[in-house]
Image (cartoon, helix red, strand yellow):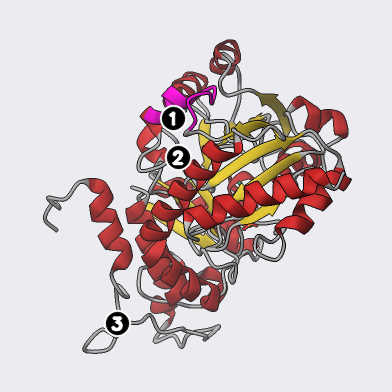
Amino acid sequence: MTESPLPWKQAIECEALRGPSSSNLDNLPQAEPISVSSVWQMESPETADAALEGKEGVFVYRRDGHPNERSLARKLAKLNGAATAMVTSQGMSAIAATALALLKPGDHVWVASELYGKSVQLFTKDLARWGIGHQAFDPNDEKQLQRLADSNAKLVFVETLSNPRLRLAELDKLAAAKDAAGSLLVVDNTFATHLICRPLDHGADIVVESLSKQVNGHSDAMLGMVATADAEIGGKIRDTLSTFGMASSPLDCFLTHRGLSTLAVRLERACNNAMELALSLRELPEVQQVDYPGLSEHPQHKACLGQLRGGFGWMLTFQLGTNWEGVHRLFHALSPAIPFLPSLGDVTTSVSHPASTSHRGLTCEGRKALGITDGTIRVSCGIEPKDWLVNQFCAAIQRSAQLK
Ligand SMILES: Cc1ncc(COP(=O)(O)O)c(C=O)c1O
């Protein structure tokens, strides 16, 4: 294959647009066919053996891979600059399989103190039952990075942009610390996607992502991704996915493959909407703080300019000095135009409430330490016209404040 003359971002956008990458017909269909078979006929024991060893293009049993999974995963590997990628049943199975494949009792994991609530539960509670220790740390504290460099950490887990306060994990610095410790850096890239940041380019060993979010983009499929530059690590994770039964569904792969082809245009619009909304919300007296990487007051705005490309993301978080009742009033005022949706990355803008949904598993003190209060509201921006969107929020915030 010849080198593309396009800058990498344009080249990967074009890659995402192309139709199916392989077919056993004489000419390619433009739309990806959905392959529902759970098992494939084997020509001989040799064929079965080679296929189960990972030979490309031959399938055995859906749990070990299927045509819709392979064509999506092949594309995702290229887009993420990885040697290999796998599509899993959900974002959580991508994270769980990575941990289960690479850790054993007695190992120690360093996990960012601010993460999606289920990831916190996995690393601090569930893996602890398997004898795997953990250390919570702030990826942006130089002293803690030095301690990480001197530690015996087997694996380091962070989110590119954290859920929900949108703190950036500065990956080049983290990669230097994990190299010194001889550990593996796993980055959850759900709040960025490969178009905004490619963690493998910054020294990460493995990138995981919930494809249920922006890559699919329509809240109608659940999938996860694991991608790595190390084929041996990829093989271990693939075995774990099969043993633990974490395979993807063909229909969900089909839908997500379709979502991937419009990701670049959706993302550009959603990032612009998030920037406009962040700028407008910070002018409102009712809003105490806005967390958005594109704002100059974001504590890592400069680092974001260096690490994020093509936008600062579609997620923003703001603080209202109120309790659950005040949040309920606001959500009622926003509805039905802006739904309360405990998810993110849809074409429709939505709001969520971390204290009662994604971070409900943490104690009140645990949430407070992360700056998550009862009045913390997370917004996932969609692709609506920006003036309409800003008006919906400003009017609803003012209306609900008057109802106090
Ligand atoms: C940052 C992050 N990682 C992982 C997940 C889990 O993904 P899934 O819901 O596809 O299991 C989520 C879900 O919200 C998330 O926000």
User: Which residue was labeled with disc 1?
Assistant: 304
Residue 53 spot, x, y in % from top left: 43, 64
Check disc 1 and report its element: helix, strand or loop.
helix
Viewer-side label of 2, 3? 2
Determine whether the beta carbon of the residue marked 3 sits less than 8 angstroms from the nearest atom of ligand 1.
Answer: no
Residue at the spot x=63%, y=62% of the render?
243
State the residue at coordinates (30%, 67%): 17
| Residues in magenta, as a range | 295-305
Q: Amino acid at mark 1?
A: Cys
Give the mark nearest the N terminus, 2 or 3. Answer: 3
How packed mark 1 is, by other alpha carbons closer than 10 Å (few <14, some 14-19, many 20 or more), is: many
Question: In the drawing, does residue 83 fall left or right of residue 337?
Answer: left
Please name the residue that numbered disc 2 is placed on: 312
| Residue contact between numbered discs 1 and 2, judged by CB atoms under 8 Å | yes
Please name the amino acid that badge 3 sits on.
Gln
**Percent x, y of residue 56:** 35, 68
Q: Of residues 164 and 102, which is closer to you in this image?
A: 164
Above or below, 15 relative to 19: above
Viewer-side residue, 234 vs 166? 166
Label located before the other in sequence (1 or 2): 1
Circles 1, 3 touching at the beta carbon (< 8 Å):
no
Q: Which residue corresponds to the image point at 63% horizontal and 22% vertical from the top-left?
A: 138
Answer whether residue 314 is visible to the viewer in this image: yes
SS label for mark 3: loop
Q: Which residue is tagged 3? A: 30
Label 1 C-beta lies within 8 Å of the nearest ligand 1 atom: no
Mark sitting on residue 178 = none
Q: Secondary structure at mark 2?
A: loop
- Marks 1 and 2, how far apart in space? 8 Å
